[in-house]
Image: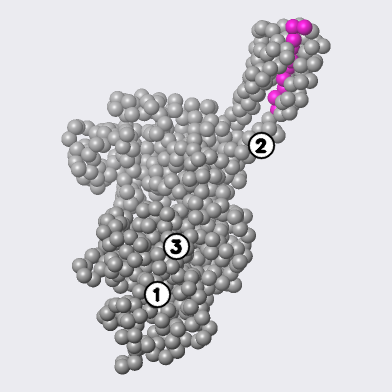
């Protein structure tokens, strides 16, 4: 707990007296005026409530702390462990801590008090507040400054909570999620090991009581979610309790869909346990807020989810298919049969979508480490997620992409292991000196390359006459013609020879498992053949252009309102625009639609409306919901062509529909056969 220096001294005086202490005595002890004492002890009961202590005032007598000896002792321990100056390492950290301090206040706080807490001048605090003010705006919060009174933060309680939680997560030095085993002592130790500055701003007594409630909850929630999610839940509930005690509850109802009765029941049980422990009442909106947080938690392991649970979210399944397909294309390796990757992404993306729906951000404590160790893979995964923006208007933060990178990195390692175990390559060895030397060299190669299935000594005649079977690679000490790959080496097999053989082996293994081998799903060629290219007047507003496209589609008139609703619902969230290509995308999944349809368009004249500034071209895509795998694959590949096909824009701009269809067909064939 952080107390202002003066309040700290006042409380120390009060705990040392069993009877009332007058304002005059307190003022003399601190060398301040009676008025200053009065200002310091305003709202102090909010700070004392966690200790079950109340400051009692009596006219003509003064002030007295009322509570049991045990509770008073706990307060004394808190006072003794408190520091007048909040520790920080640099100016940035000071500003983060200052921001939390301001957010946690329930009334105005003077600059002089803040200056004392951080051991800097009021001028420094004022300059820090200028920087903090800009950060607060991003959370839709306003910093109010009143000359002679101090500062306070104005805004919705929901936004205050989000800001507090975000800053706390940024500051907490989270380690690897498997750092500690699941037990009360370890999670308590975890919080104790964090920097005192942060825990000073979160009431420690409340933190530990929240942990105790969760550890003993009949829901067994702490055994079902990851450590990172658990820590987040502790922080969330601690802040909620503190804010409710201060009279700042969430009152406005969230737009939640109560589609998970089991999770809703867990939220209500946790809230009931918290209410009993802290003797507070959570408004209904607070229950929704906790449910929102639980929906955003990640399961401890994906095996806890049934197959029905994982597959029930059709949208999430489609996103995973798109991600893995695009990653496979970029890497030129087929990851679509990796069940662990598919299941892991499904388990991760479901809470991710919930968090994004409710405006919650995730903090990835491993992000900097991921950037350092897997920087190139992180870039590839970031490129992979572009497909989610094009298809679902979904932009992931670097923190989210960092988590996806771990999933894809694990898939790469599994593939390497499978390559070593399953893919066999037979090597033939031939030497100019004869079969004996060939056998000697073959023995050395066999011991060096354990992943080679067979290493066979051959004579020159064997090679010339092709008297060998099932040989994938020749290693030769002489120049010789061959219709299979050959590596020329020195008979002593130097280091550079070993490297050359390794490179050839890896290349052959890659060739032995082409992308198309395990993909039995063909494209829907009917969709491709019916792609259309039209010109549109973009000197109209967005609604008029979309209506024009719907009218030009081959769908039944009766379903046009549904198509318009589907397109506009996505547009109301945000438009999908590829700025580098001056390209806009309209697409939606429509229940009751008979056939999928793709209409590319280019603007018909130079003049455009405000809605289409810098837009030259685009695509309109509608697909039945649900639909078949071949249609999904086709539509996803057409979408990917916007990013990956360099000839697409010239084909659109040509105005020639046949050229466009040929361009897309060629792109899809290349993807199909690698």
SS at circle 2: helix
Specify which label sits upstream in the sequence, 1 or 3: 1
Which one is earlier in the sequence, the residue at label 1 or at label 2?
Answer: 1
In the picture, the disc for residue 471 is: none
Residue identifier under label 1: 8
Q: Secondary structure at mark 3?
A: helix
Quick check: 467 left or right of 231? right
The residues tagged by marks 1 and 2 sit, at their Cα atoms, a distance apart of 61 Å
Question: Please, which residue is most extreme toward the bottom here?
Answer: 60
Label pair 1/2, CB-CB below 8 angstroms = no
Residue 16: image x %, image y %?
A: 45, 84
Q: Is residue 530 above or below residue 204?
A: above
Q: Can you identify the residue that label 2 sits on?
A: 417
Residue mark closest to the camera, 1 vs 3: 1
Q: Quadrant of the N terminus?
A: bottom left
Give the percent coordinates (x, y) of residue 470.
Answer: 73, 20
Residue 670 visible to an observer of this rendering:
yes
Q: Quadrant of residue 47?
A: bottom left
Q: Which residues are magenta?
A: 424-433
Question: As displayed, is residue 629 above or below residue 247?
Answer: above
Q: Nearer the viewer, residue 568 or 432?
A: 432
**Element type at mark 1:** helix
The answer to whether residue 667 is magenta is: no
What residue is rendered at 35% in x and 57% in y? 95
Q: Is residue 425 highlighted in magenta?
A: yes
């Amino acid at each position: 707990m952080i107390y202002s220096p003066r309040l700290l001294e006042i409380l120390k005086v009060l705990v040392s007296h069993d009877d009332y202490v007058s304002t005059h005595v307190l003022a003399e002890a601190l060398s301040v005026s009676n008025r200053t004492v009065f200002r310091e002890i305003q709202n102090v009961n909010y700070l004392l409530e966690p200790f079950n202590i109340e400051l009692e005032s009596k006219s003509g007598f003064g002030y007295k702390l009322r509570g049991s000896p045990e509770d008073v002792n706990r307060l004394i321990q808190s006072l003794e462990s408190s520091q007048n100056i909040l520790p920080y390492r640099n100016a940035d950290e000071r500003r983060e801590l200052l921001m939390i301090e301001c957010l946690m206040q329930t009334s105005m706080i003077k600059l002089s008090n803040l200056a004392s807490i951080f051991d800097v001048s009021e001028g420094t605090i004022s300059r820090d507040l200028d920087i903090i003010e800009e950060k607060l705006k991003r959370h839709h919060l306003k910093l109010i400054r009143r000359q002679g009174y101090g500062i306070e933060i104005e805004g919705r309680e929901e936004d205050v909570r989000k800001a507090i939680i975000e800053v706390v997560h940024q500051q907490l030095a989270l380690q690897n999620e498997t750092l500690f085993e699941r037990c009360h002592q370890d999670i308590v130790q975890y919080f104790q090991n964090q920097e005192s500055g942060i825990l000073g701003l979160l009431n420690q007594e409340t933190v530990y009581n929240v942990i105790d409630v969760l550890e003993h909850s009949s829901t067994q929630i702490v055994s079902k979610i990851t450590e990172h999610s658990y820590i987040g839940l502790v922080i969330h509930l601690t802040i909620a309790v503190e804010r409710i005690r201060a009279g700042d509850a969430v009152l406005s109802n969230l737009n939640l869909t109560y589609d998970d009765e089991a999770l809703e029941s867990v939220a209500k049980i946790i809230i009931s346990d918290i209410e009993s422990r802290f003797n507070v009442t959570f408004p209904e909106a607070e229950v929704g807020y906790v449910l929102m947080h639980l929906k955003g938690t990640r399961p401890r392991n994906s095996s806890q989810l049934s197959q029905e649970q994982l597959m029930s979210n059709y949208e999430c399944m489609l996103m995973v298919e798109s991600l893995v397909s695009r990653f496979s294309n970029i890497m030129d390796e087929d990851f679509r049969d990796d069940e662990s990757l598919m299941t892991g992404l499904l388990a991760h993306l479901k809470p991710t979508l919930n968090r994004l729906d409710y405006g919650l951000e995730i903090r990835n404590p491993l992000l900097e480490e991921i950037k350092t160790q897997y920087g190139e893979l992180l870039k590839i995964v970031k490129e992979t997620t572009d497909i989610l923006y094009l298809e679902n208007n979904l932009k992931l933060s670097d923190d989210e992409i960092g988590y996806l990178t771990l999933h894809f990195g694990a898939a790469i390692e599994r593939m390497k292991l499978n390559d070593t175990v399953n893919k066999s390559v037979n090597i033939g060895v031939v030497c100019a000196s004869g079969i004996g030397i060939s056998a000697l060299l073959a023995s050395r190669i066999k011991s060096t390359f354990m992943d080679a299935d067979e290493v066979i000594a051959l004579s020159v005649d064997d090679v010339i006459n092709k008297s060998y079977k099932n040989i994938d690679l020749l290693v030769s000490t002489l120049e010789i013609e061959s219709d299979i790959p050959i590596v020329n080496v020195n008979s002593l097999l130097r280091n550079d020879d070993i490297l050359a053989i390794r490179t050839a082996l890896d290349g052959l293994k890659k060739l032995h498992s082409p992308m198309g081998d395990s993909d039995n799903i063909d494209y829907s060629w009917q969709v491709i053949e019916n792609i259309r290219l039209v010109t549109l007047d973009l000197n109209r507003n967005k609604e008029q252009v979309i209506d024009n496209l719907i009218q030009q589609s081959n769908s039944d008139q009766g379903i046009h309102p549904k198509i318009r609703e589907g397109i506009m619902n996505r547009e109301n969230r945000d438009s999908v625009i590829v700025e580098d290509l001056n390209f806009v995308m309209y697409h939606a999944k429509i229940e009751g639609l008979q056939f999928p349809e793709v209409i590319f368009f280019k603007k018909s004249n130079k003049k455009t409306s405000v809605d289409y500034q810098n837009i030259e071209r685009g695509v309109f895509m509608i697909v039945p919901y649900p639909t078949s795998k071949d249609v999904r694959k086709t539509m996803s590949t057409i979408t990917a062509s916007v990013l990956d096909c360099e000839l697409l824009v010239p084909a659109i701009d040509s105005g020639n529909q046949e050229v466009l269809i040929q361009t897309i067909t060629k792109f899809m064939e290349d993807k199909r056969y690698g």
